[in-house]
Image (cartoon, rainbow, N blue to C red):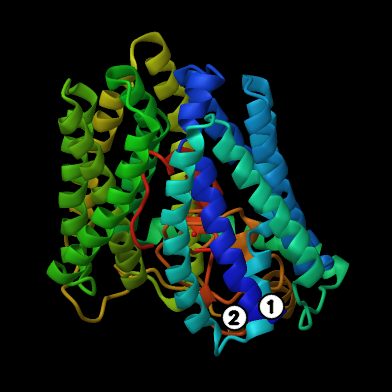
Amino acid sequence: MRASVTYLIIRGSTAFAGSCAFTLNLVYQAQVAGLGPLQLVLVGTTLEVVCLLAQVPTGVLADLRSRKQSVVVGYLLFGTGVLIEGMAPHFWAILAANAVLGVGWTFVDGAQDAWVVDEVGPGRVSLLLVRGAQLDQAATVAGIGASVWLAGFGLNVPLVVGAAVWLVLGVVLAAAMPELEFRPEARHAAWRGSLRSMRDQAGRAVATARRSRPMRFMLVAVLLAAFASEGFDRLGQVHFIQSWSTSPYWFGVMAVAAMAGAAAVTELVRRLTDLTDPARTARALAVLQALGVVATAVFALTGQFWVAVLAWAGANMARSAAEPARAAWLARLTEPASRATAYSLFSQADAAGELTGGPPLGLLAQRVSIGAALAGSAATLGLTVPFLATAGRGLPAAGPLGDEHRVVQAAPDAERPAGDAAADEAAEGVGGDGDRAAGSGERLDRDLGGSRRDEPSHDRGGGAPVHDLHLDGGRPAFVREQTRRASRPDGQGPGE
């Protein structure tokens, strides 16, 4: 089977399986498994922690052994984890299932990116990615429809069907996925490069934040927004169920409508805002976030179903439109040599916010009410607005940026000792690069049944810029699917 055909099969299959399994996943966890608000949040937190811990070793294994084997194992683990969750509706079983899912995602992340670039070639991969994104959107809508229909037979059925698709995909890839261009890394170079890249990246991340005042404000905004998102993402569906006994059918309709609305709002922002002007982009981000605050607060407090639907959709669309604008802002303030580090820094801030925000908001929902937790999310989100507005102050309009605003490389390679340069070369080949080794990455794209925003990424072993297919805000798109499939189906947008 040709690599391009294989890639399109992966895109369509994973998009369908993900939207089928996760459109109503939170409904299943709440109604069938009986998880409370705190438990719902802890499931997502567990998944993220496992992804963070497993990413480096699985990435190194992909470079030492085989990208194909890594991808195959990853999808088999996806299917196994989802099948466990669908067949065992108990809290501890669901936690274990999500641990399996997290490990599976780390096997796929980076390995599949590197595989497609190696096999297709950097000159042809961009067109293939566009075709894959189009196929992904169609498969996502089909998966949502299938999820709603299958839920009529039982809320666990969409999970079982999604698991079956992933398991079959893993078996098919084991037999037919080509791998002709892979050149394994030397074992010692891979481990040494991975560990060194993590250490160096941490140092560069700190230096990046220190050098740029706008970056510091934007980082705080990202951290707070991620903190707030966990309450909205994990508890939004349950809020509909408890307040209005919303049926699975409505969740499917809302998911498709939100996809279309998010795409429209994103296009509107692109037309109305000069995204090459970082000052205007920051102001647009502040406006979008303010709209998101109002929408989230209304969603938390209203007693009217249709008002809640519109508020929920408005909050989702504002956030969806803000993500590509934030990516454009960040690209404008970074040099190519330091861009990967900057993206990774924002990825880490996003992950840290969600990891720290989930438990307290879940506890608030458990002790008080889900509405109170959603109101807390709105209040926390409101704190981001002044930081976003401040991030644009003092920046010049579209044109050259001075070094006091732009994040530049800390030190040219020519100034480093020869030993450091050699170690850097080794690090570049591990798991895609240093970004991968730190458990994050450049991309803002959705994976496994989601819509995505493909943003340019650094080299992943192919010799030319490609797209990172698995990370959304630097976090596993798989994590996004668990937490946001029902509460935040983005529009056009880590694609797989």
Q: Quadrant of the C terminus?
A: bottom right
Report the residue marked by disc 2.
413
- Tell me residue 88's x, y (percent): 67, 25
Q: CA distance from mark 2 to mark 1?
A: 7 Å
The N terminus, quarter of image: bottom right
Location of residue 361 in the rendering, given as x and y in whole percent from the top left corner: 40, 23
Q: Quadrant of residue 133?
A: bottom left
Whether residues under marks 2 and 1 lie with C-beta atoms below 8 angstroms apart, the answer is yes
Toward the top, the furthest residue is 367
- In the displayed structure, would residue 335 be above or below residue 225? below
Near mark 2 (Cα within 10 A), the count class, few <14, some 14-19 or many ≥20, is few
Question: In the visual, does 200 lie left or right of 145?
Answer: right
Judging depth in this view, the residue of 42 and 208 nearest the camera is 42
Q: Which quadrant would residue 213 be assigned to in this image?
A: bottom left
Q: Residue furthest bottom?
A: 123
Residue 258 at what x, y percent from top left?
Answer: 29, 49
Foreground pick, 52 / 392? 52
Q: Which residue is mark 1?
A: 421
Q: Quadrant of residue 301?
A: top left
Q: Is 131 on the left or on the right of 11, as rendered?
A: left
Q: Residue at x 40, y 9 (%)?
A: 367
Picture residue at 76% right of the left edge, 77% below the top? 178
- Under circle 1, the secondary element is helix
- Residue at 17%, 64% (x, y): give it: 268
Q: Mark yes or no: residue 275 visible.
A: yes
Q: What type is the residue that disc 2 sits on?
A: Asp
- Look at the picture and state if 101 lies above or below 328: above
